[in-house]
Amino acid sequence: MTTLTLSPTLNADLHCHSVVSDGTQTPEWLAERAHANGVQLWALTDHDELDGIERAASAAAALGLPFLAGVEISVTWADKTVHIVGLGVDPAQPALIEGLRRTRGGREERAREMAQQLEAVGIPGAYEGALKYVGNPDLISRSHFARYLVEIGACTDIGDVFRRYLTEGKPGFVPHRWATLEQAVGWIVDAGGMAIIAHPARYGFTPQQEHTLFSTFRQLGGQGVEVVTCSHTPEEIQTYRQMALDFGLYASRGSDFHSPGESRLELGLLPPLPSGLTPVWQHLGHRIRMPEGAGAPVHSS
């Protein structure tokens, strides 16, 4: 019988991506990898898409792996793209489904403009090249272009791509107007989930902007922040530990895994949450999908 004790030291990985969005592996493969790496609670959080959830949940159940339904929503805030993870969402909730459908709109037009910019600097055929890596054409993204640029030898690896192309001020960067912060948090909350600011150190906000983001997010009903993730340094982990405490937010942990050859961290191979925080899973126990025959998650004493 599978049991799950919701202790702060639980090996939870609550942020990763499948081929349904911009990952390279299937939901089933990810479930196997998470299980093999000792993950005790897993979530699939594809970008602006829910279609992998039931496949992931079925694969996790077959492995005896507790699972949370998730999504990562693209948001435009202060003229930058910010990502809000939703955990414990109901993937059948109509407002969430429709909101994500609208958010996905416009990606093809954006991708064609990205390809035009790359062609102007001597890289033709990037749109067609990127499509080779797309599992879901509605979700063509910079990651798919990056894989093509590595394939043709224009860049040595994914990091090299984003140093030279596809980022603000570089060829191939085309901004997109995503959902608003209010919309994303509202969709997640209405779907019974918890809204979480993903990898906050990545956005490059000033301290004042970051304080405003966290304050606004909290006022809108957001409840969590990713403290431990692949892109956070040990110093940044401590910074966002303090932000979680200052704003009364639950703490999350996730590898942001996309691919074995690209990701900085493997599924489940993350540092633990710092002490003194309340993990998101202690609030989301009722939303965890336990394998058949398993008992309900229990809090540690």
Image: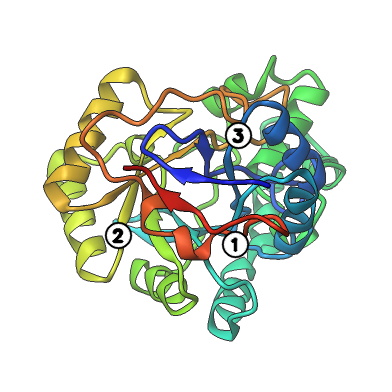
CA neighbours of label 1 inside 10 A, class few (<14), some (14 to 19), many (20+): many
Mark 2 or mark 3, earlier in chain: 3
Mark 1 or mark 2, earlier in chain: 1
Cα distance between the residues tagged 1 and 3: 24 Å
Local SS, label 2: loop
Frontmost residue, 96 versus 80: 96
Q: Would residue 45 be found to the left or right of residue 247 on screen?
A: right
Q: Nearer the viewer, mark 2 or mark 3?
A: 3
Cα distance between the residues tagged 1 and 2: 19 Å
- Identify whether 99 is placed above or below 257: below
CA neighbours of label 3 inside 10 A, class few (<14), some (14 to 19), many (20+): many
Residue 118 coordinates in the image, percent (x, y) = 68, 38
Q: Residue at x 60, y 62 (%)?
A: 48
Frontmost residue, 116 versus 268: 268
Mark 1 or mark 3, earlier in chain: 3
Q: Which residue is mark 3?
A: 39
The disc labelled 2 sits on which kind of residue? Gln
Are the residues tagged 2 and 3 within 8 Å (C-beta)? no
What quarter of the picture does the C terminus occupy? top left
Q: Would residue 243 be found to the left or right of residue 45 on screen?
A: left
The disc labelled 3 sits on which kind of residue? Val
Frontmost residue, 22 versus 56: 56
Q: Is residue 80 visible?
A: no
Q: Residue at x 62, y 52 (%)?
A: 67
CA neighbours of label 2 inside 10 A, class few (<14), some (14 to 19), many (20+): many
Q: Is residue 257 visible?
A: yes
Number of labels in the image equals 3
Local SS, label 3: loop
Cα distance between the residues tagged 2 and 3: 23 Å
Q: Which residue is mark 2?
A: 223
Q: Which image quadrant is residue 253 in?
A: top left
As drawn, the label of residue 48 is 1
